[in-house]
Image (tube, grey):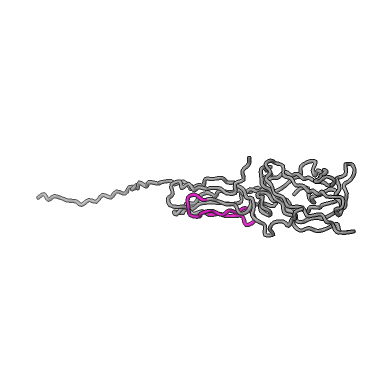
Amino acid sequence: MLLYYAQASWTANANGHSGTPTWTVENNPVGGSVTLSCYTCSTTEATSTTASAGCNHDVAVYVTYPDGAQSAPLYVLINTPASTTLQANYPQNSTWISQPGWNGYQSKYQWYLFDLCGNGLEGLDINETFGNWTIDYTYPQQTNWPFPKAGSAYFAGYDFDDFLAASGPSNAVPPPQNPPQPPQPLGDTTVYHDTPWYYFAGSQSFGSGVPIRVDTQQYYQDHGTHSLANW
Amino acid sequence: MFRPYFRATAVWYAGLFLTAVVSHAQAQPTISGVNAFWYLGGVLSDGPGCGQGG
């Protein structure tokens, strides 16, 4: 399993020079940056504070000894989850009946995640935040659908997904419907939407981690959508 | 009468004096450690979402 270390240990090799070296870091103002656990020491622990600008080793680190001898720079890439691609055959809309006699749907999106260099990622904590809700269904009376609850989970594999789901009784306003069977078209009755919807990687705490998707969630009477397929 | 003849001589050596300089050709310091690792985020200022249970 891929491990995502956010820290690195670096050791200065004196090569005959004496004394304790001093570390210098040249961060990219619009890219990667690190902080060090100590700056005059032989071994230091680097912690990433921002990601590199693209697949570039854009952080330069070097050591200088008391006699003025300086190392060649160590150029460092601070990688991060960076993009998502919707998998083929998604979204998938299916019937979801959470209680007998109810109707409803779940619309499933599944993405691949890629790092700054275009490599696929696996095994990451994910969380979502919803942003602000806007009620679309107001006539003849305002919807009484409850807002969904934000989710967080650890995804062990390459597949990262999200469900937009609704299930309710016939007296809900409007009553949730099962998705129509193709070739019948999906309905266009909107209920509510939220924006900006964020999908974060790297943490299960809501709002923490790296934002890897942002779009709008739209809940319809018989299905749900994300406004952007890829990001 | 024979008088010893002393001639002061001064012999100068105009050669090269080689100084044995022991030169320690010191190598450049280096850094060992990984040159790529990860950033997995901080906390956005707008905090967690406002989803309600339902």
Q: In the image, is residue A28 part of the stretch drawn in magenta?
A: yes
As rendered, which of B24 and B50 lies closer to the eye? B50
Residue A82 among magenta residues:
no
Image coords of residue B13 (percent x, y): 29, 48
The magenta region covers A24-44
In the rendered image, is residue A126 in sight?
A: yes
Q: Is residue A78 left or right of residue B18?
A: right
Image quadrant where one finds the N terminus of chain A: top right
Q: Position of residue A215 (x, y in %)?
A: 76, 53
Residue B31 left/right relative to B49: left
Q: Is residue A106 visible?
A: no
The image position of residue A121, as x and y in percent, is: 67, 43
The structure residue drawn at horizontal position 41% and vertical position 46%, both measured from the top left corner, is: B24
The count of marks equals 0
- Side of A24 where A77 appears, left or right: right
Residue found at the far left of this picture:
B1
x 47%, y 50%: residue? A42
